Image (tube, helix red, strand yellow):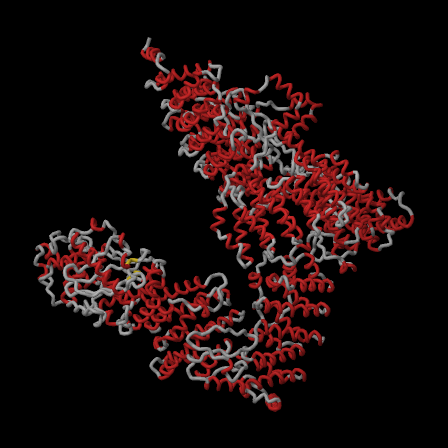
Amino acid sequence: MSEDEKLLKEAKKLPWEDRLTHKNWKVRNDANLDLAAVCDSISDPKDGRLREFGPFFRKSVADSNAPVQEKALDALIAYLKAADADVGRYAKEVCDAIVAKCLTGRPKTVEKAQMAFMLWLELEAVEAFLDAMEKAIKNKVAKAVVPAIDVMFQALSEFGSKIVPPKRILKMLPELFDHQDQNVRASSKGLTLELCRWIGKDPVKSILFEKMRDTMKKELEAELANVTGSAKPTRKIRSEQDKEPEPEAVSQAVGSSPAEESAADIPQDIDEYELVDPVDIITPLEKSGFWEGVKAAKWSERKDAVAELTKLASTKRIAPGDFTEACRTLKKLITDVNIAVAVEAIQALGNLARGLRTHFSGNSRFLLPVLLEKLKEKKPTMTEALMQTLQAMHTSGCLSFTDIVEDVKTAVKNKVPLVRSQTLNWVTFCIETSNKAAILKVHKEYVPICMECLNDGTPEVRDAAFSALAAIAKMVGMRPLEKSLEKLDDVRKKKLSEMIGTGDPSSVPSSVAVQSSGRSMPSTEASDGSFARRSAASMLSGKKPINTAPAATKKAASGKSGTNKKSDVGQSKVPKPTEQEDIEPSEMSLEEIESRVGSLIQADTITQLKSAVWKERLEAITSFKEQVEALTSLDPSVEILIRLLCVLPGWNEKNVQVQQQLIDIITHIASTASKFPKKCVVLCLLGITERVADIKTRGQAMKCLTTFCEAVGPGFIFERLYKIMKEHKNPKVLSEGLLWMVSAVDDFGISYLKLKDLIEFCKDTGLQSSAAATRNSTIKLIGSLHKFVGPDIKSFLSDVKPALLSALDAEYEKNPFEGASAVPKKTVKVTDSTSTLSAGGADGLPREDISEKITPTLLKGLESSDWKIRLESIESVNKILEEANKRIQPIGTGELFGALRNRLHDSNKNLIMATLSTIGALASAMGQPVEKSSKGILSDILKCLGDNKKNMRECTLSTLDSWLAAAHLDKMVPYVTAALTDAKLGAEGRKDLFDWLSKQLVGLIDFPDAVQLLKPSASAMTDKSADVRKAAETCFSEILRICGQETVTKNLRDIQGSALAIIVERMKSYGGFQESFESGRSASASIATKSSTKTGKTNGSRHGSKAVPSRTVPTKGSRQEPIMSIQDINIQSQALLNVKDSNKDDRERLVVRRFKFEELRLEQIQDLENDVMRYFREDLHRRLLSTDFKKQVDGIEMLQKALPSMGRELIEVLDILLKWFVLRICESNTSCLLKVLEFLPELLDMFRNESYVMTEAEAAIFIPCLVEKSGHNIEKVREKMRELMKQIVHTYSAAKTFPYILEGLRSRNNRTRIECADLVGFLLDNHGAEISGQLKSLQIVASLTSERDGDTRKAALNTLATGFKILGDDIWRYVGKLTEAQRSMLDDRFKWKAREMEKRKEGRPGEARAALRRSVRDSGSDPAEQSGEVSRSITVPIFNRENYGHPEVHTDRLPMTQTYSGVGPTDWNESLDIITYGSPEQSVEGMKVICHELAQATADPDGSAMDDVVKDADRLVSCLANKVAKTFDFSLTGASSRSCKYVLNTLMQTFQNKRLAHAVKQSTLDSLITELLLWLLDERVPQMDDGSQLLRALNVLMLKILDNADRTSSFAVLINLLRPLDPSRWPAPAINESLVIRNQKFSDLVVKCLIKLTKVLQNTIHDVDLDRILQSIHIYLQELGMDEIRKRAGADDKPLRMVKTVLHELVKLRGTAIKGHLSMVPIDMQPQPIILAYIDLNLQTLAAARMLTPSGPAGQTHWSDSTANNPAPTAQSADAQLKQELAAIFKKIGDKQTCSIGLYELYRITQLYPQVDIFSQLQNASDAFRTYIRDGLAQMEKNAAAGRTPSSVPLSTPPPAALNLSPNPLSPVNANTLNDSRNLNARAEPTNFSLPPSYAEHDQGFNVISPRVSSYSQSALQHNLDDSRNERLPSGVSNGTLDAIRERMKSIQLGSSAVNPDPRNRPLIQVNGNVNNHPVPEVHGAGNRVQGGILPMDEKALSGLQARMERLKSGSFDSL
């Protein structure tokens, strides 16, 4: 006996616990085996041993040895099978152990663990199981999470939702959806789908979807579509299994009562309410201000308060609470005077009822009477809200029938009929939604109520009572109601029975359907206890089919019954059930393969294939190939050879040559073998596909795939490739695979392919790919398909992106449809693999079976009494066709055609047209089978031609076209023949039908059935209607041509009378041309069409459309027809204008902008027609484009009606409309022209209301035509055009209209010239100021005085006389050269005009202009003080924005109220006057003169002209600054931006000269800068004419001002502008942003300007007046106050930061000398100015950082000689300052990192102070250090001579370490500074302190205080000291020193308290006194930093100061 056996034998004597925990694994293993055997032997679940074994499994299943663990699980399974529910006490520990240790083990271990879980569930340990699952899904190893999800899935699937509560699983799922592992996500999706089967889709969606990502939602939505039917449990818990009867009894029970079993199988619906957790809404309601809001006086506040409750109560489940007070409040609000509040309160009650359910029953009964009373309201919103709330109260269980009887009785007696009827409607709803038992209890109460209401006087109440009675009868049957209904008369009984009868049939099938659905679920799992592991991911599509729907079961049953008769035949053809499994290859190890290969392949070859040397493998594979090729019979060994090759060398082979040989061998086997198994293809396909992606093996791989197609058929290969290519990570696999598919389609055609799958793959995968190569390959594949299937493929790709569609169209052109000529190049060997499409047509494209979508509801809707429902049903059919890509099968469409047939006789004509369109679409979608499926509907279609409405007949003909395209004409001829002989068809219908027949017969040559049309054609040739006779003759000619004379002659026997005579006559004429007819048989269809058109004498269609020409000819009754579209009956519901795709800007770019009118060319008219059809509704554009002027007038009337409501849309297409008006004006029809002239003024009024101004392009389209045609020969038209022209001048612009009018003066039409001359006079009289710049054009008017026509001369003279009135004698300057006769005429007319003006007391000619100039001069010489704007012409709006700093001159101060009518200034002063008081257009002339003067003065800068200009520079800039706003405002009204450009250009010229720029005063500069910055920020500027140029000009001008203006003034102005701006200064009120945001943007712009000035301050410090700048800073800080400064410092305030930055830069550049520039700051004020503290602070921090610039005498730090109670300390000497500097420099030299900087600074000291002996200060230093200093200074001198800075010259050798200047060397202080203004954006400047206290200093020390550092760390002092500061301080600073500093700080605080008891309110500290022992105050720790308002200082700075202080104490620098 071996030792192991001994051990095991001995161990068996041990107790179970010792054996199971033994240290030897074999003992434990043996123990588990024994334990399992014992458990198997136990038959009594109450056996005591089971209780003993229970605690052992907690440890045994967690065994570290995998085999032992597996045996432990076996033992556990045996234990659980033997036990009962009593062992559940051990479930929690054991389940937790399994989760912790077993789910990550071997697959077998995991499977057994899952089996154990299922057994625990069988023993009802559900809670322990779910607790364990919650822990399992949180495992970090994804491998452990998937089994946990799978076991939950299987538990739910087998036990059902009754045992496994879905609520807890729903809580676990959200975190799984976002898991990083895709397998976990897939499994969680599968579990979700299983949940949907048990509790429904809607609850799962509502609970889970809001917690999902969008991508997950989309994926799940797609999967949910496949989940149908219901689920039932397949496994029972142990206790239920024990109750099960014997199998025989079960079978008997099933046989006896199948209905009961099916009812029991139906799973109970799980209420979503039970799945969600209750939410407490009382607490948030209290916090929301609900109780205050409902008492508010404003209705909006009350509504908002109730809306908050509505929102809170909208949760699915509300936690119970006391809602009594809330309901009382809502009861009051239900009767609120404001209906919105009442509706909101009612909705809140509804939400409470849904969320609280039975907990709201008391409140519901309390509120019910009020709600029923409120039903009297007629407002739909109120009624809807009430009904929803009342229904919610019932369905939620808040109200029961017994509770509401009394309230209902009261309500039905209400005096308001609406209350009675609505109450009964609600009762009806309650009855219908209740169960039968509840109604049986209370029906005796409600029937009398309803019976009483049947006698009500209101029909609505009676109808509602009938409905309630019917509902009761349906629920409980008629028997309980018989006694009550005896009293009814026969009429009412009949009505009631009808109502009950209509409801019965619908109720029965629903229950049956439910039962069948419950029964149809197959039990897929065995219930014998064997475990079949299922994965949750198998629920996903493509992995495992989901349970089938009841419909599928029904289909299968019907199919089965239908094939019973042919069962014998069918069995022979049905494939074996195992065929599908044979396709999937089973796993086979290499050893097994080698053993089965045997002697087929040499053993050496196989051995070599395993070699790691590629050459050996290559040799082996070559030998392998030779051996395979030598085999005579391959068939028996094909599979084993393929398996061997897939393993050796396998698809992971790296060597390309070996790969190529491998593929060649497989190709050879596939092509040689007579039968190549599909499982071999499956083995190779993935590897081959990957080789296709490799360019080196692509050729061989593609050839191999083609060989596979020949072997097994391309259909199988394609189906397998879809998944491989879609899921492969290498995009090349997809793109190259698609290219192979292109070649496969070319080779094999499409007969073997499932085209639907292929097209969907292309759409969903190929075209959606982000790789361009993949998309291109897909496009090629679709193009290849197009060659075989034709254009119908486009309907499957209609939803593809437009760019791809265009690429596809191009590919279609390359691969045109070949039809039958497209023959496959290769064939498939195996015929039974062919898979042609049964549902496809001749083209192979799939057709969809829509029979399931043709539901009874749809068919019932088509028969509804409501026309809207009928229309919706017709539209539903159209939608079904769209979803099927307009390709359907005829299956199940018979009933649909029958229903549609009835609709062809509908009373609503619009519905008939809709039905015709739908039937046409059905025919096109179905194709040829439509003939059999349509049930003779064609005859009913043809009857529609008898309608007298033309659009109905056109719609019918369109349907016939569609039918003809689907079926053949010979099938239609019998129906057409019958229709032609029908008397009801009418003349117009017969004529249209004959025309249609002629059109179809034209292209036919051989059509024998045409002879059937002979008799109806002959009859029609004798018709009394001439149109019918002509159409019949045309048709007869075609019949004669097709059938020939002989055939026609044979069929004349049935024709008699006059018809026969006409035919004989026609045939005689045919005889003479018989030869030509015979020869013309082969003529083209186009020639035949022309001949038939001539014969028929019909008019061609205007646009060459395909429709019958006669249909487009307007008839006499066309104006009386309703406005109805041919194509769409809902045309009236569409918008009149479709501007969605309009691009007005692109159209306007094509407009040629000329002043002269040119008539529209033909191509322009065609473009116009296209645009009108595109953007105008069809009925409108048909009228507008009609040749009938009456229809055109109708179109204008439609526009007139739409004008008030569609102003914006009309503006969008205004250019198109104006072109159309131009066409109408050019035509000679007076009626239409007058209508146009009636409409245009209304259009212009709309422009004014919409504040719209015509664009220049629109003006160029219309105004030239209007001007040219203004000389119309009808006086009435001329008057209307004259008034229209004046209106255009008012709304557009006089200045812009003037050139068009001038062009009209050159017209050849005398009347046009007269009208234009009068218009010039009108402009001079009313808009003289606006056209003042164009007055030189008056010479054109003057030239008309020489015309021969007297009226023309008279008009010209009158116009010039008007000009004389305004301009006076200046007019002679503008009339040009005139002859003496002309001058004489003008002189006479001017004298006459002067006399007329005297008579009317209008003053003298030109006096108005002169008066204005005088008033300008007299009103003051300084426009800077008086610069307002006079009233301008009424056409220009007046802007009342103030000009700050320059008081406005009101119009009543001016002697003139007329517009400034000046022609042009002549000198500087007059120009300034015009700029100041003229309109923007006028001021341009003044600015021209100014610019000219400035150019001359700049050319001679030293001359007197420049001096004169400099004197007036401030006045000029003041005028221009005020003009900026006016010009911009003027341009914003739609005018040209010309004046804006002139203003900015003049300012630019001014500020380009520094002398002129410096002459501008600060107040003027303030006004100008403010204005420019405001317009830079104005959002309207970019929308202006040339807006981008204006913005650029504003920017450049601003930069020029900052460069050349007085910098002191600039600083002062900009610092002043940092304060908040007055709201009235903004050019326009804020629309989209608040005033705070606007001010912030303005401040940011000012800060940028200050940055630019500050950046160059180092170079310009001597050019600025520091006193004024400091005064500005002082004023800014004082206005803010310390509280505001502290507040802003914490809020990152940019303006404050900028001011501190400017001050810091000034202090840095001037040092202590800055204190000498405080002459304008009141330094003696109490408390001291804030600026002083900031200067102190900057000085101390800069000194600490060694950044002060030497500037004269240093150390003067006191502010005033008179400070309270304390004399000022004396100044420190320059020597002491020098000592400090040298000490710091030596310290830097002593440090390796800063030695170079230290040497450079020492070199500078030697240059500044040559008298100082540096080396005498180094007596205590070592010789080496002194030598280092000497050499370093020499090197620095060389660098300085070479122009190099120390930063560019690295020091090669570090300084010696023997520097002993002080006992403890200190490191230098490094502090960041704001050397460049760009650091402002980096938020690091040393000036952001919110509390800078002042300080006092002593002669012998430094006075340094600790400033409070702002809360945002953006200053140079970024690190606050904390309590651990002492540990980091250099060794030179002792704790005693720091304690002394702290003491000093306390004294500072005390001093602060003395001055200001509240340091937070008055943070400025004045501390004076002598500092004797420890002069450096130290701050407290971080904990005390708020005391006294003093915060810690930067640690580095403090360390540096302490070091210097220590050196002073130690006397290190005494020798200096």
User: Is residue 950 rendered to the left or right of residue 1569?
Assistant: right
Residue 1479 on image: x %, y %: 51, 77
Q: Is residue 9 above or below residue 516?
A: above
Residue 1369 on image: x %, y %: 54, 88
Residue 761 on image: x %, y %: 55, 38
Between 1848 and 3, the residue placed more toward the observer is: 3
Q: Is residue 1291 above or below residue 578?
A: below
Q: Is residue 1276 above or below residue 1369?
A: above
Q: Is residue 1134 above or below residue 1010?
A: below
Residue at the right extreme? Answer: 1057
Residue 1495 visible at all: no
Between 1676 and 381, the residue placed more toward the observer is: 381
Residue at the top extreme? Answer: 1
Image quarter for residue 479?
top right
Image quarter for residue 972?
top right
User: Is residue 77 rendered to the left or right of residue 963?
Assistant: left
Q: Where's the C terminus, which quadrant?
A: bottom left
Between 1870 and 1921, the residue placed more toward the observer is: 1921
User: Is residue 1059 rendered to the left or right of residue 847?
Assistant: right
